[in-house]
Image (tube, rainbow, N blue to C red):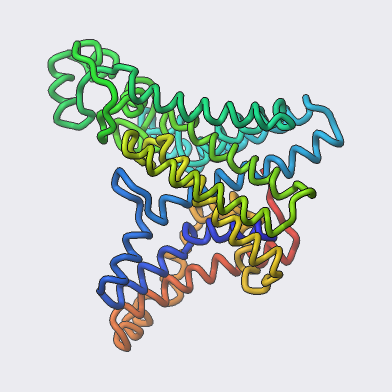
Amino acid sequence: MSLDALRGFDMLWIVGGAAIVRAVAGMSDNAGTRFLVTQMTHAKWEGVRFYDLIYPLFLFLVGISIVLSLDKMLARESRPTAVIRIVRRFLLLYAFNFVYNGGFLTRWPDIRVASGVLAMIAWSYLFAGMIYCFFGRRLKVVAAITVGLLLANWALLAWVPFPDFQLNDQTIGALAEKAGSKEPAAISAIVTQRAHGTYEPGHNLSNYLDYRYLPGKLMARYFENQGLLSPLTSVTLCLAGIFAARLLLNAEIAPRRKVTWLVVAGVAAATIGWMWGMELPVVKRLWTSSFCLVTAGYSAVLLATFFLIVDLWKFQRWCQPLVWIGVNPITIYLLYNVVDFPKLAERLVGGNVKEAFDGIATGLGGLVSASVSFALVLLLVRFLHQRRIFLRV
């Protein structure tokens, strides 16, 4: 249950939890509420805020799910069957990513096809699943692969040269005029100077590769938050989840000692990540190796906390709403994109009703609206849970 509850806790902030925190902060402007609002937004570039942990934690939990699902499949069926299932899930997630990003709502080249949240989950799941499928019983090999991927990301960003120009409208416009073309290949060809080891927004190897090779519309106009290099390190979060799952399933280790190991490993990973960050900045938008180590460490500590409270101490009633969300995470993520729950809430408590609440206390109408929106989400996931409807990919 702790796994479902933690997954639900992770998704909670995307489907209304963060909006409630912002609404509460809107009722009173002070140092505490400003801190909460800051934590409910992504860091502009370097650093880690609470909201930056949501995506890495989900990938960490994907790694745990890989062990739980593939162990059963490999025991009952063959490895080729497991490989087919991994590939099928990868393709489905990629298809969902395309729909989530708008599908054919717009015309080419304004279609976002090659990247996105679900796309990177798909790639991370594919690579981690294959690694576990072939090396799952040889954890030393999995550990070596994990370290190798982290070092590879650092080596590429630090040492591989790329054309030395800034990815912004002014620079691209001037270079396009000089090249006589807006094509990335033509613009890159006229820049003779090279740079490496830079980690500034729009001026690093990862962003350049996105600009040069990713087709279609990009989130940041010239580059992505989940670009071509990102799966190289995002998969390590799944691999960290695999290690956590193997620890939890080890019957030879006492449950409370498992909690200790998770906390110790988590603190160690986060510490190493922050220390590495002095050389390789902790940047979510680049998914640097240091960022992945820091967030893998935080994820392990959160897992230890939920495992202790929910599964060992058996305090479980409080987390039932989290479980409702956690057993249908992809479903509610997609539905929240298709169904405008905040706008639906406005139909119920907007207009004069919202004004009436604001008359009682400044910002109370916004809090009521955000709370109703989240309540609608909870009603939906509770309905699915009660009817035993679990939509799997």
Q: Quadrant of residue 380?
A: bottom right
On screen, 345 above or below 76?
below
- Residue at image x 59%, y 61%? 305
Q: Outermost residue toward the right?
A: 76
- Residue at image x 63%, y 30%? 142
Residue 25 place in picture, x, y as percent? 32, 72
Residue 383 place in picture, x, y as percent? 67, 66
On screen, 389 above or below 273?
below
Residue 53 place in picture, x, y as percent? 45, 51
- Residue at image x 24%, y 20%? 195
On screen, 222 above or below 362?
above
The answer to which of 125 and 338 lies nearer the viewer is: 125
Residue 168 place in picture, x, y as percent? 20, 32
Q: Quadrant of the C terminus?
A: top right
The answer to which of 295 and 218 lies nearer the viewer is: 295
- Residue at image x 71%, y 25%? 134
The answer to which of 320 and 341 lies nearer the viewer is: 320
Q: Quadrant of residue 95?
A: top right
Q: Quadrant of residue 190?
A: top left
Q: Outermost residue toward the bottom?
A: 360
